[in-house]
């Protein structure tokens, strides 16, 4: 989902000023408590919530396709429930 003031490049990476939002396609591991903890997957969709006040960081949710889960549909996780395992190769090489 693209929001005003936030550019999305051709790879689906969403850029914000001052915030770190992982791009679509990034490999992540679920770190939050719950039945999916420790599973890895790929980000399918990023939903960004813009801050209400100046100086606040944006908050986002990631829709992730998990590997090894009995549920085959992508599942939503808050940004603080996942950690990056690997970014897209184009992002790592600086090709935005």
Image (spheres, rainbow, N blue to C red):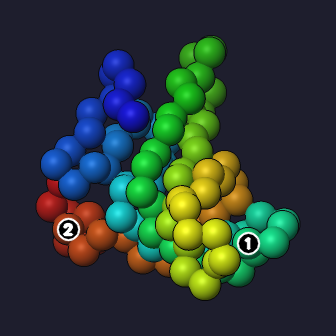
Secondary element at tag 2: helix
Q: Earlier in the sequence, mark 2 or mark 1?
A: 1
Q: State how far apart marks 2 and 1 are (Cα).
A: 28 Å
Q: Position of residue 34 (x, y in %)?
A: 84, 67
Q: Is residue 72 above or below residue 6?
A: below
At 66% from the left edge and 49% from the top edge, which residue is drawn?
Answer: 78
Q: Which residue is mark 1?
A: 36
Point out the image quarter for the C terminus: bottom left
Whether residue 55 is visible, yes or no, is no
Secondary element at tag 1: loop
Q: Is residue 62 above or below residue 58?
A: below
At 57% from the left edge and 41% from the top edge, which residue is drawn?
Answer: 60
Mark 1 surroundings: few (<14), some (14-19) or many (≥20) residues within 10 A: some
At 31% from the left edge and 50% from the top edge, which residue is drawn?
Answer: 13
In the picture, measured across the screen, residue 24 lies left or right of residue 91, that is right
Whether residue 57 is visible, yes or no, is yes
Between disc 2 and disc 1, the foreground one is 1
Point out the image quarter for the N terminus: top left
Q: Position of residue 76 (x, y in %)?
A: 62, 51
Q: Which residue is mark 2?
A: 90
Kindly identify which numbered label has been placed on residue 70.
none
In the picture, measured across the screen, residue 61 lies left or right of residue 8, that is right
**Which residue is most to the right?**
33
Q: Is residue 51 above or below residue 11?
A: above
Between 85 and 62, the one nearer to me in the picture: 62
Q: Is residue 93 above or below residue 57?
A: below
Between 55 and 41, the one nearer to me in the picture: 41
Q: Position of residue 63 (x, y in %)?
A: 53, 53
In the picture, measured across the screen, residue 54 lies left or right of residue 92, that is right
């Amino acid at each position: 989902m693209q929001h005003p003031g936030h550019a999305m490049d051709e790879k689906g990476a969403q850029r914000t000023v001052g915030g770190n939002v992982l791009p679509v396609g990034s490999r992540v591991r679920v770190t939050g408590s719950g039945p999916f903890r420790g599973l890895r997957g790929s980000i399918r969709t990023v939903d960004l919530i813009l801050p209400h006040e100046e100086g606040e960081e944006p908050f986002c949710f990631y829709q992730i396709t998990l590997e090894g889960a009995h549920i085959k549909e992508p599942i939503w996780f808050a940004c603080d429930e996942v950690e990056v395992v690997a970014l897209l190769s184009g992002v790592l090489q600086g090709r935005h």
